[in-house]
Image (cartoon, rainbow, N blue to C red):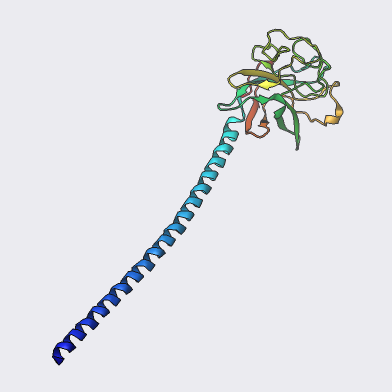
Amino acid sequence: MKNKNEVNKKMKNENMNERDDLGSIGIGAMIVFIALILVAAVASAVIIQTGEKLQQNAQQTGSDTQEEIGGKISIITVWVGEQSDCDGAAAGDACITLVYELAAGSEPMNEGDVIWTITCLQGAAMDSVWGTFDADTNPGAGDDVNGDGTTVLNAMNLDTVHVDGTRKCIDNGGATATVCTDAGDIHDDDILQPGQVYMINLKTSQDASDAPAQNQGECDPSINEQHELTISVAGGGTTTEILSYTSVTEGQSVV
């Protein structure tokens, strides 16, 4: 009887130890499971944060690329313009004629947001002339040109026109007009549209009608010289072209 009791007691102790071992294994597994959940949560947060940052960078890069590629001027051709009296105001100024369009993907832009600069070498020093694609320096005073011969003062270029030489204008309702009047410049259209080809005369030197306060230099066409034309769009890209003069005869191509 004693041996039987000892055997039963021993079996009971073994069963209790076995249950204790199973409980310990279960607690350990739970700890590992919780740890895995925490690691997964941290890893997910890092992945999500990294993904958002990459997306923002990609969007910014795409936006910058769009502005750089789309928001710029595409030069079609440039030729030697009038070399004695470009603006019809006073003899002494020369010009070049630029034919251009907006680059593919560009949005409509204002003529005044397009800035041009011609840089040249005069002797041992650099010289330059500059302006915008809008010659309306005094709105309301009838200073839009290329239609009635009115002189534009303080401007180093004539106003942008269509490629056939007709003026860009709109009617009182804001629609494109076929006939322009000079009633206070309200009919001058200063917006450049994608898909349209335009033309403008850029003055390469001043004359007596231009304000000395502009402090412009002189980069008149000269045989066997190369001048640099740079066109920049506010908030957009920049176009650079080398003007190579093999002749100063009006109409001679220089690009």
Left or right side of 86 for 36: left
Q: Nearer the viewer, residue 195 or 1?
A: 1
Q: Nearer the viewer, residue 77 or 92?
A: 77
Q: Quadrant of residue 96?
A: top right
Left or right side of 108 for 215: right
Above or below: residue 152 compared with residue 19: above
Left or right side of 189 for 6: left
Q: Is residue 222 visible?
A: no
Left or right side of 47 for 63: right
- The N terminus lies in quadrant: bottom left
Q: Quadrant of residue 70?
A: top right
Residue lying furthest top in this view? 179
Q: How many marks?
A: 0
Q: Position of residue 162 (x, y in %)?
A: 66, 15
Q: Is residue 22 visible?
A: yes
Residue lying furthest bottom in this view? 2
Q: Quadrant of residue 138?
A: top right
- The C terminus lies in quadrant: top right
Q: Position of residue 198 (x, y in %)?
A: 64, 18
Q: Position of residue 171 (x, y in %)?
A: 71, 11
Q: Position of residue 215 (x, y in %)?
A: 83, 31
Which residue is rendered at x = 24% and y = 83% of the image? 13
Which residue is rendered at x = 22% and y = 82% of the image? 12
Which residue is rendered at x = 48% and y = 50% of the image? 48
